[in-house]
Image: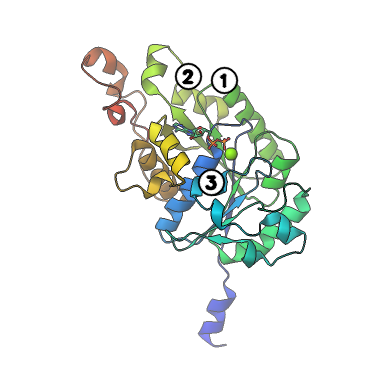
């Protein structure tokens, strides 16, 4: 057998990762858009799938909403080929979005349909990231149907943690084995002053490996409104660095987390002149 035919037979191993949480508004879409962009910047072939069929915000965060013609609904209805439904990002080669649809405002999709859609999509990409809706109903079942990995997003607040816990149990019951935790909207100074949940507390409660911690950061809101993912910015904000680090960890690189019980414990007493708005990176070493 000619060696080239061997190479052709080795298909790309696609990682199908669902980004989920249980609770709404905790940063799933933000993380999906930025991780997709960060991985594409690292040279990976990435498809982002908007599985939040009702809210469908992923196109907005990526600034691709004006370029949508077809979407997943049209493909599933047999009205277009999958390639026609994909929107290629012009800033980053290797990144495509599968939106919901521009024309169809409603439709029902089953987990089996999602599985077959992803079977068609996945072979051409190294990563497929699926933006999941809030809740644990049908939309969630669709989003996780084909996933082999999950990133569970929570904020350090009790309702969000409880929903994340439920989601983790459901994912485990469904046989999704590789689960990682992302803690978003972390405000270390506030947590310290008001004795709120620490990163360690959250991780111990949820008991799955931590892959990233993203600080509360106004630049996230700015980027959302400009349709320009944070990780594209020339001057990287702390949250952009955090998101890039998550992408590196997904790639298997070791990007160290600093120790929670390190000298930062007595930070407030140690230096009263610290301005939390300018010294955030010093206060939150977990990026
Ligand atoms: P979800 O997809 O889970 O509903 P989104 O990604 O849409 O959540 O985020 C909800 C809101 O929170 C958005 O307005 C977004 O800009 C904001 N947000 C998300 N993460 C952060 C953060 N780290 N700092 C500040 N705002 C954030
Ligand atoms: Mg969302």
- Which image quarter is the N terminus in? bottom right
- Where is residue 284? Give x, y as percent: 34, 28
**Image side of residue 151 versus residue 196, left or right:** right
Residue that label 2 marks:
197
At label 2, counting other C-alpha atoms closer than 10 Å, the crowd grade (few under 14, some 14-19, many 20 or more) is some
Callouts 3 and 2 close, C-beta under 8 Å: no
The C terminus appears in which quarter of the rendering?
Answer: top left
Q: Which residue is mark 3?
A: 60
Left-right relation of 131 to 196: right
Question: Which badge, 3 or 2, comes first in the chain's sequence?
Answer: 3
Residue bearing mark 1: 158
Q: Nearer the viewer, mark 1 or mark 3?
A: 3
**How many neighbours does mark 1 have within 10 angstroms: few (below 14), some (14-19), or many (20 or more)?**
few
- The residue under the point 39% across, 47% down is 231
Q: Secondary structure at mark 2?
A: loop
Residue at the extreme bottom of the image, as rendered: 2
Query: What is the secondary structure assignment of the residue under circle 3?
Result: helix
Alpha carbon distance from label 3 to label 2: 32 Å
């Amino acid at each position: 057998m000619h060696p080239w035919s061997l190479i052709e037979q080795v298909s790309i191993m696609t990682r199908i990762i669902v980004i989920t949480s249980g609770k709404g508004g905790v940063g799933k879409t933000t993380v999906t858009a930025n991780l997709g962009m960060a991985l594409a910047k690292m040279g990976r072939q990435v498809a982002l799938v908007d599985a939040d069929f009702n809210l469908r915000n992923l196109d907005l965060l990526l600034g691709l909403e004006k370029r949508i013609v077809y979407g997943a609904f049209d493909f599933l209805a047999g009205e277009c080929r999958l390639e026609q439904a994909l929107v290629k990002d012009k800033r980053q080669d290797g990144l495509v979005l599968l939106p919901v649809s521009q024309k169809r405002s409603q439709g029902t999709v089953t987990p089996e349909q999602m599985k077959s859609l992803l079977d068609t999509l996945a072979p051409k990409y190294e990563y497929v990231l699926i933006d999941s809706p809030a809740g644990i109903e049908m939309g969630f079942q669709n989003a996780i149907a084909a996933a082999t990995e999950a990133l569970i997003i929570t904020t350090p607040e009790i309702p969000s943690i409880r929903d994340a816990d439920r989601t983790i149990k459901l994912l485990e019951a469904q046989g999704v084995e590789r689960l990682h935790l992302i803690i978003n909207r972390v405000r270390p100074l506030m947590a310290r002053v008001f004795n709120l949940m620490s990163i360690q507390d959250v991780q111990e409660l949820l008991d799955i490996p931590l892959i990233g911690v993203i600080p509360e950061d106004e630049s996230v809101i700015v980027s959302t409104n400009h349709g320009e993912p944070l990780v594209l910015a020339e001057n990287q904000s702390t949250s952009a660095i955090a998101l890039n680090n998550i992408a590196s960890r997904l790639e298997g690189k070791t990007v160290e987390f600093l120790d929670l019980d390190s000298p930062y414990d007595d930070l407030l007493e140690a230096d009263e002149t610290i301005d939390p708005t300018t010294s955030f990176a010093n206060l939150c070493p977990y990026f």
